[in-house]
Each structure stands twice: as C-alpha cells, then as structure tokens.
Amino acid sequence: MDSKHSMISLKQKLSGLIDVIPKQSEIIYADYPLYGNVGDLFIMKGTEAFFKEHEIRVRKRWNPDNFPVGRKLDPNLIIVCQGGGNFGDLYPYYQGFREKIVQTYPNHKIVILPQSIYFQNKDNLKRTAEIFSKHANLHIITREKASYATAQDYFTSNHIKLLPDMAHQLFPVVATQQPINQKLRFIRTDHEANKELQEDAKAESYDW
C-alpha cells in the first residue's frame, strides 16, 4: 500500500470515535494547545476538522489556563480533551489538568483523544490510574500500540481504544504553492529535545 492509501486508511479509522462522540453531539473542547509545539497545533486542526465533518457542536473551547474548573456544566455535554503526546509525567501541568477534570466532573462523559502515554515514574502512573479508576464514563484513546498496552494494564476500569492521531483527519493536505530550495527546521526545546541532533549543523534530519 503506498503512502497515499495508507493515509486514507488511517483517516477512515478515526470514524471509530463516533462510538464515543456521536454525530451532532454537544461538547466542551478542553485542553486545546496554547504553546509552541507545532505538532500539537496540527493535531488541533485535525480535531477541529473532525468536529466539523461530523457536525459535533463545540459549546466552549478552553485550555488549562482558563478552564473554569468547578463550573456547573450541562449534564448532556461531553468533555473532550486534546490528543497528542503529553499524557504522563513529562508534562505534569497538562496531566494534572486532565486529572482535575476527571475528579471534578464524575457524572460527565469524558473523552481523551488519541494520546501517547509515558511515565518515567511507575508510582505516578499508578496514582493517575487510581484517580481515573473512580470515573465510570472515562474514555482513553491511545494512538500507538505501546500506549494501548499500558492503558490495558493500568486503566482497567476505563474504556480504552486504539485509534490514529487526530492529525490524520486533515488528509489530503494540498500545497498552495511550490516549495523553494530552502530548509526549515523545527528544533524542539522541551523535555523531548534531542540535543545531539540540534547541535549538529550538518545533520540531514532532526527530531521534530
């Protein structure tokens, strides 16, 4: 299968989200990215495209900096958290926000869009699993097999799925102009930066 058909297949698999966020649902979109990770912005664009295609109505868009935690919400609203790669203890601010949402809204359906799960400290993983185990309607979507296996092992009280990254919803991406003969490099500065690659000016590829 060539790359074009692979991308079509991955996009089609995202329709599996309709099982947990039905068409024409009304939702709160929480945890949208407000930081410099370009990949997460791409994921957000794919998420918004998915909402539009399936007529999912976003009542409010909030992020961890402005979400009014504790505010009473319509019980029929689904709380949907951004996908990406910050589920774990590398980014405690964003993980803590999700945990607070889960604790504050035990009677709402909560959906965490396709995430990679990574904990450096197993005690932190167990603590998060304990918090999440108390929520009967929490759906954790993972975006690759290693995270899915972790979810199956530790988040046994929750609903678990394996689906592609939300960025695949944007396929096909059509260029609006021809590329020019220059290089643009996205060089990470966060916990996942690859210092060796960043400092090698002759490197042909970078961790991005």
Image (tube, rainbow, N blue to C red):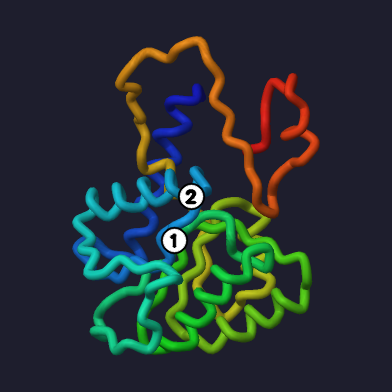
Q: Amino acid at mark 2?
A: Asp
Task: Give coordinates of residue 166: x percent, y percent.
Answer: 43, 49
Q: Secondary structure at mark 2?
A: helix
Q: Relative to the observer, which residue lies in front, 116 or 205?
A: 205
- How many residues crowd mark 2 within 10 Å: few (<14), some (14–19), many (20+)? many
- How many residues crowd mark 1 within 10 Å: few (<14), some (14–19), many (20+)? many
Q: Is residue 112 above or below residue 198?
A: below
Mark 1 = which residue? 82
Q: Is residue 9 above or below residue 178?
A: below
54 horizontally vs 113: left or right: left
Task: Give coordinates of residue 133: x percent, y percent.
Answer: 57, 84
Q: Secondary structure at mark 1?
A: loop
Residue pictured at 50% horizontal, 10% vertical: 181
Mark 1 or mark 2, which is nearer the start of the sequence?
Answer: 2
Residue pictured at 74% horizontal, 41% vertical: 194
Q: Amino acid at mark 1?
A: Gln
Residue pictured at 56% horizontal, 20% vertical: 183
Q: To which quarter of the image does residue 4 belong?
A: top left
Mark 2 = which residue? 40
Question: In which quadrant will I find the C terminus?
Answer: top right
Q: Is residue 204 above or below residue 170?
A: above
Separation of residues labelled 2 and 1 (CA atoms): 9 Å
Q: Are marks 2 and 1 in contact (CB under 8 Å)?
A: yes
Task: Give coordinates of residue 202: x percent, y percent.
Answer: 74, 19
34 horizontally vs 125: left or right: left
